[in-house]
Image: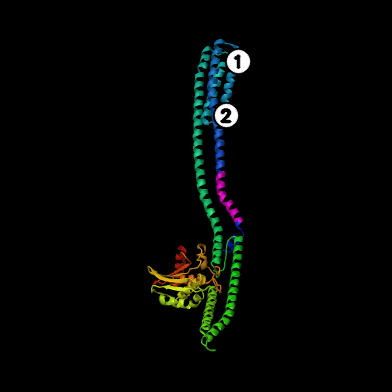
Amino acid sequence: MTRHRRLDLTFSLLQLVLIGFAVVTLPLGLALATAWFAVDHLASKGQDAVVAAVRATQASRNLIEEITDVERLARQYHVLSDPALLESYEAQRESFLIHLADIAALEMGRSVRTLALDLEAASKATFAALDSGGTSAEATKTALESFAHLNVLSRDIYRESVRVVAREVEAMHREGADTRQQLLWEASASIPVALLLTFIFTMLIARPMRQLDQAIRSLGDGRFDRPIQVSGLSDLADLGERLNWLRLRLIELEEQKTFFLHHISHELKTPLTNIVEGAELLSQDVLGSLEPEQHEILDIVRVNSLQLQGLIENLLTASNGEDAAAVIAPRRIDLDDLIRKLAERHKLPARAKELDIELILSSETLWSDQERLATIVDNLLSNAIKFTAASSRVRIVTGNFNNDIYIDVRDEGKGIRPEDRENVFERFFQKPSVGNSRIRGSGLGLFIAREYALALGGRLQVMNSDEGACLRLRLPRRRFFGASEAVDAARTSSQST
């Protein structure tokens, strides 16, 4: 295993691609070369066979014509005794014997050679009988009549040559069919081999690429707990090591950020607690009675101090990366009573902007986590008061839909642009500050609200509104998911919506 891993790491991605291309094309190249040699061999052999067949056919046909000419000249000479005819006879006879020797020399098989030798022996006997000067007329007549046998032998040679050529053609057809079948088998075998090699090299490349993809997705999702290890190709393994270094660096930066936020939050909470306690003491008339206006100012200080304390807690919650569904404590909740208490808490900020908080409640009850539900509605109401127009109103409407209940928080501000409807739920996303708001938000309120909504098995989304913004919280009335199931199911439903 170690030896294989070490061998695998010696190749880079480019080297493996080049090697894979060469190895995959090798069986196809071998099949192509074999086909080329086979076709070349068949072509060469076929050409030789055609030339030999043409020569044999032409020679055997000429042989018939020449033996006929020899017979004709021989008969004319013995009738006319013309020396010129004798000279032509002897020249034609020599040409016939030369062509007969050529046929015997051709590789036309034993049958043609045997017939050629028989014809040569018979023709030489006939020619010898005609050349004998003392031969009687009867012997000469017998010799001339033997030309018929020579013609028969010549025609037998021609017919046998044709049959030999036909057998050669048939053999060439069989050899061509065998070669075609062989090439078909080689092609059929080379294609699966090439596909198998392609699959092997693809897996060698895909495995580290898949590991890199998983590592990058883990970093993108903020999961830094598992080390990143990429095995296989040397350059991809080096890239995996750099990604693991990046993971460690991100962990270090996350720890530094958390430490910084905890430190800053602690430093902020100490004077803030003193402010809240001082405001409480003043409101209890410890230093003497106060005028109603002074009490009102103290209430504003106390409420805004508590709001600032909530922002700090939200910042800590987001920075710690706490799972909103870690601890769920379901209980029966009177939704009307909860919303009225939250509206009362925001009475002073609403009065500062001359706002009316209008409650349109439908006496709903549900089983859920009261603390997290209160945080969601509190953040939505705080957001609506902050961004609504001065001297306007904020409405909270409750209702039911099938087995779910919904809570709508509507304002009369500038609303939320369509392209920002998902962005407003991201960490630290902030719209431009409007109105007379003195405290700029942390950009975590809606992020924490949606996380809590998912943890409670519901969803939080921006609805269409003719005026201002409308955010709807939808929760199951009775059905309650487990912690992890609630978040997964609600996220899936929210994304599909």
Compare residues 370 and 16 and report the one nearer the observer.
Answer: 370
Q: Which mark is residue 87?
A: 1
Q: Position of residue 84 (x, y in %)?
A: 60, 13
Compare residues 167 and 201 and report the one nearer the observer.
Answer: 201
Q: Which mark is residue 314?
A: none
CA separation, marks 1 and 2? 27 Å
Residue drawn at x 60%, y 18% as measured from the top left: 91
Residue drawn at x 57%, y 26% as measured from the top left: 101
Residue 14 appears in the figure: yes
Q: Position of residue 188 (x, y in %)?
A: 50, 47
Amino acid under label 2? Answer: Ala
Q: Main secondary structure of the magenta part?
A: helix
Q: Which mark is residue 105?
A: 2
**Residue furthest left as drawn:** 402
Mark 2 is surrounded, within 10 Å at the Cα level, by few (under 14), some (14 to 19) or many (20 or more) other residues, namely few
Answer with left or right where residue 330 lies relative to residue 249: left
Q: How many marks?
A: 2
Q: Which residues are magenta?
A: 14-33
Q: Pick the quarter of the image with the N terminus.
A: bottom right
